[in-house]
């Protein structure tokens, strides 16, 4: 058997470094008083703008075209929104030995957010998997997550979630979620027919804008955490325990998606797409959602997601490199079920 080898250059996401830098700034210079009110208002506007852009970018037609491949997409959705949350609920038994209650709530929230799109496509391409399937699976997950993630959070997080972090999910909390997340997303979908071409032409610039918006959301959340003294609840030992739990969670999901897809008789290329799309969680979607769902307690809620995001990039890079070295039938150059060639080129 071939050993897994580490790439010579590990994928340390530069954006993670920016996020950590933003956390450091929030720790040294947290927003207070009027500044906190201004930052909170700006973060609310940024979240609405983010989900408007998500709606404008997502091609509903392409997503609907993939419905005929329902077995693969249902498998990914089940992994993302059923298996992951069940493992998150099982981790409840690790409190208080490995995790504090706030860290557990953040870990549980991590298991509820949708899958990634860009990195799933990139790793699937690197591993010579079914790239069109990865595109559709990521799009479906993001689309479903807009509605399902808040509903799962309402059902599973209970009184620990919601704006303000107390009192559970009231009718006002549901309305706030709809107004801040779903309405802008739907507005983006409606406006896509007029602004879709503009968004596509200025993808890089708008990408910088939405990443900057997420940094603002992180700064606001961690500032509130610093002012309220939430970070005093996290010790190095607890942080190490969280990392260990997340490593096990990722390993379990990677194994389940690979061997489960094999048991369901998916081909190699489909199994690769299922593994990378079904085992990952989206930082870009999760951070804004946490800000709405957790309010002042969002800083601890997003910490597990930030750590898991970097961990999944590093581990999946190793796996993708190993899969790229697997022997592939040279006569299989296309996947007719997905209407096109499976290439090594990642769509820009």
Image (cartoon, rainbow, N blue to C red):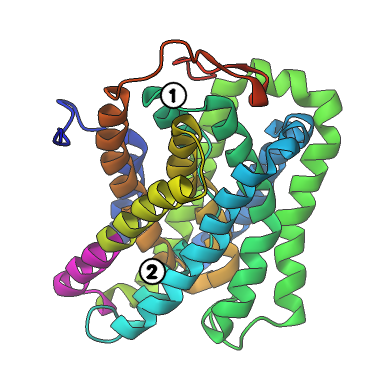
User: From the viewer's perspective, is residue 225 above or below residue 165?
Assistant: above
Tell me the element at label 1: helix
Q: Position of residue 318 (x, y in %)?
A: 24, 35
Name the residue at 75% across, 55% down: 182
Mark seen at residue 300: 2
Of the 4 image quadrants, the one containing the N terminus is top left
Q: Secondary structure at mark 2?
A: helix
Residue in view at x 50 percent, y 60 percent = 35
Rounded to the nearest angstrom, the CA distance separating label 1 from label 2 is 34 Å
The residue to which callout 1 is attached is: 125
Mark identifier at residue 158: none
Task: Of the two numbered discs 1 and 2 on the same chain, state the one appearing first in sequence.
Answer: 1
Magenta stretch: residue 236 in it?
Answer: yes
Q: Left or right: where does residue 3 sit relative to residue 175? A: left
Q: Position of residue 103 (x, y in %)?
A: 35, 74
The chief SS type of the magenta part is helix
Depth-wise, is mark 1 or mark 2 nearer the camera? 1
Residue 198: in magenta span: no
Which residues, given as a range, are shown in magenta? Answer: 233-246
**Image quadrant of residue 71?**
top right
- On screen, residue 319 versus residue 260, left or right, reads left
Residue 72 sits in which quadrant?
top right
Q: Residue at x 54, y 70 (%)?
A: 295
């Amino acid at each position: 058997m071939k050993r897994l080898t580490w790439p010579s250059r590990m994928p340390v996401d530069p954006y993670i470094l920016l996020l950590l830098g933003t956390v450091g700034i929030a720790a040294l210079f947290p927003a207070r008083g009027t500044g906190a009110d201004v930052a909170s208002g700006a973060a609310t506007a940024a979240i609405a703008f983010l989900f408007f852009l998500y709606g404008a970018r997502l091609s509903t037609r392409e997503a609907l075209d993939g419905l005929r491949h329902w077995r693969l997409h249902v498998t990914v959705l089940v992994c993302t929104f059923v298996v992951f949350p069940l493992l998150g609920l099982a981790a409840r038994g690790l409190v208080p030995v490995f995790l504090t209650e706030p860290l557990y709530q953040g870990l549980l929230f991590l298991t509820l957010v949708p899958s990634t799109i860009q990195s799933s496509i990139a790793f699937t391409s690197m591993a010579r998997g079914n790239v069109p399937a990865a595109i559709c699976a990521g799009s479906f997950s993001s689309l479903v997550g807009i509605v399902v993630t808040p509903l799962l959070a309402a059902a599973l997080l209970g009184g620990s979630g919601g704006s303000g972090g107390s009192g559970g999910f009231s009718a006002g909390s549901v309305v706030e979620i709809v107004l801040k997340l779903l309405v802008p997303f739907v507005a983006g979908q409606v406006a896509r027919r007029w602004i879709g071409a503009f968004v596509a032409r200025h993808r890089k610039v708008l990408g910088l804008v939405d990443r900057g918006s997420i940094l603002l959301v992180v700064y606001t959340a961690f500032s509130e955490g610093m002012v309220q003294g939430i970070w005093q609840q996290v010790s190095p030992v607890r942080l190490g325990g969280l990392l260990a739990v997340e490593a096990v969670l990722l390993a379990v999901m990677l194994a389940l998606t690979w061997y489960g897809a094999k048991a369901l008789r998916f081909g190699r290329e489909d199994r690769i797409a299922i593994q990378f799309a079904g085992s990952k969680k989206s930082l870009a979607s999760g951070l804004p959602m946490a800000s709405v769902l957790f309010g002042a307690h969002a800083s601890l809620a997003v910490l597990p997601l930030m750590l898991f995001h970097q961990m999944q990039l590093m581990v999946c890079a190793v796996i993708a490199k190993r899969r790229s070295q697997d022997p592939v039938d040279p006569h299989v150059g296309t996947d007719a079920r997905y209407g096109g060639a499976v290439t090594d080129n990642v769509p820009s």
